[in-house]
Image: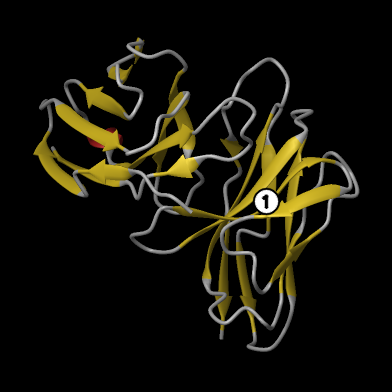
Amino acid sequence: DGGITQSPKYLFRKEGQNVTLSCEQNLNHDAMYWYRQDPGQGLRLIYYSQIVNDFQKGDIAEGYSVSREKKESFPLTVTSAQKNPTAFYLCASKATSGGYNEQFFGPGTRLTVL
Amino acid sequence: GQQLNQSPQSMFIQEGEDVSMNCTSSSIFNTWLWYKQDPGEGPVLLIALYKAGELTSNGRLTAQFGITRKDSFLNISASIPSDVGIYFCAGQLRSGYSTLTFGKGTMLLVSP
């Protein structure tokens, strides 16, 4: 079954702790993305990666970090520097060949910082 | 970053009614995508549009890529309760551009 998995579905952390959200895809996609979604808001881009060992900041990268050591994996770390980390986090991937621009999303992780 | 203007913000309709929503921008896009998001889940791609004027259907859903390349429309015919959710438009500004611009979504509620 090809797709994108995010784990865990729900995550609770105490204020001041770093937390890492997992994103794995077996679609053989080169590009991967992290978005943040707040109630009543659209999707805001945090970081993206078009190839292994390379990534770029999105619109709201402050307080977040990523790595892309494997094609299949793009973990997101929410650091203690992120002032308002409670949100729904979505990972997506996209093929970079064939001229297609469609991004496919994982099921999301809801992070609550207490 | 730029956001698309998506309207309406929400709709409450009766089962069986047709629905129409749209996205507009001051910029030209070369791709328009429409997604549906159920509560607590990730968005699911409904329709992808790649050419100005293109009209594409997916079951009861029909979407169009505006001639000016600055807008797109999504229509749902004969709505049913499972159409409930948030519908997002997304656009890619130009070829080779690697990110999407998203609208804020249209929340659709369907009364049986």
In this rendering, the answer to whether A14 lies above or below B65 is: below
Name the residue tied to disc 1: A6
Residue A50, visible in the rendered structure:
yes
Quarter location, residue A13 = bottom right
A10 or B23: nearer the viewer = B23
Determine if residue A1 is in view. Answer: no
Residue displayed at 54% across by 29% down: B94
Assign a secondary structure to mark 1: strand
User: Which residue lies at the image location 27% right of the left edge and 26% below the top edge?
Assistant: B73
Asked if residue B17 lies left or right of residue A14, the reply is: left
Which of these two is toward me, B5 or B36?
Answer: B5
Q: What kind of residue is marked 1?
A: Gln
Q: Is residue B59 above or below residue A62?
A: above
If the image is split into quadrants, where does the N terminus of chain A sit?
Answer: top right
Q: Chain of mark 1?
A: A
Q: Residue at x 47, y 23 (%)?
A: B30
Residue B84 occupies quadrant: top left
Q: Residues within 10 Å of mark 1 (few under 14, many from 20)?
A: many
Vertical relation: A14 (above or below) B60: below
Where is residue A56 shown, x and y percent of the image?
Answer: 73, 52
Q: Quadrant of the C terminus of chain A?
A: bottom right
> What percent of the width, then of the height, locates residue A46?
62, 58
Q: Residue B6, image x and y in percent?
A: 28, 43
In x, y percent, where is residue A21?
Answer: 71, 62
